[in-house]
Amino acid sequence: MPGPIERVWSYLTESEKRGKWLASGPMELKAGGKAEFRFDHSSLSPTKEPTPERYKAKAAGVTLEIRVLRCDPPRLLAMTWMGTIKEGGPKEDSEVTFELEPKGDKVKLVVTHSRVRDRALLLGIAGGWHTHLAILADNLEGRVPRPFWSTHEKHNRDYAERLKGL
């Protein structure tokens, strides 16, 4: 990602900037801190597309409760995503970790989403992160953000093929 690291960090932690590529909402930047992520995928790009049928129930947006596990600005942010919905089953917590490392005028950003035990959910999450991070890159590069849903669907198909054996 284009740097400096503080700029990329601000897109992870500041509601207005985070809302341009992932989800808006307040966040307490400390271990044990609470956050609320309000996802509105239709607002991430000026290109408007219909919501795919399987996501229509969430078309108006989704709010996720977050608990910050570790915070070491501007290099590490780890959080529990409360109640990740397991297809056909109970809600489970999963974890997301962002690791940032300066590399010249760029920033290496590693995102790890762990404790996802459902294959269908894993595929959607993988495609979702790929799409959200592409939109983050668009914002940081000063490009018009790509359309969310068609990009997401393409990545979902790609991951379904890559992870066939799981």
Image (tube, rainbow, N blue to C red):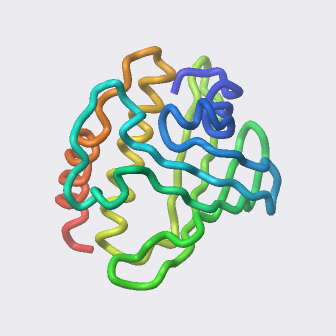
Tally the marks.
0
Q: Quadrant of residue 19?
A: top right
Q: Position of residue 28 (x, y in %)?
A: 78, 50
Q: Position of residue 97 (x, y in %)?
A: 60, 54
**Height in image: 119 above or below 79?**
below
Relative to 86, is 74 on the left or the right? right
**Height in image: 2 above or below 32?**
above
Relative to 90, is 164 on the left or the right? left
Relative to 112, is 104 on the left or the right? right
Residue drawn at 19 percent across, 68 percent down: 164
Among all residues in the image, which is located at the extreme top?
142
Residue drawn at 51 percent across, 66 percent down: 114
Residue drawn at 42 percent across, 24 percent down: 138
Query: From the image, which quarter does the C terminus lie in?
Result: bottom left
Q: Position of residue 43 (x, y in %)?
A: 41, 34
Q: Position of residue 144 (x, y in %)?
A: 37, 18
Among all residues in the image, which is located at the extreme bottom?
89
Residue drawn at 20 percent across, 45 percent down: 154
Question: Quick one: 48 or 106, which is closer to the camera?
Answer: 48
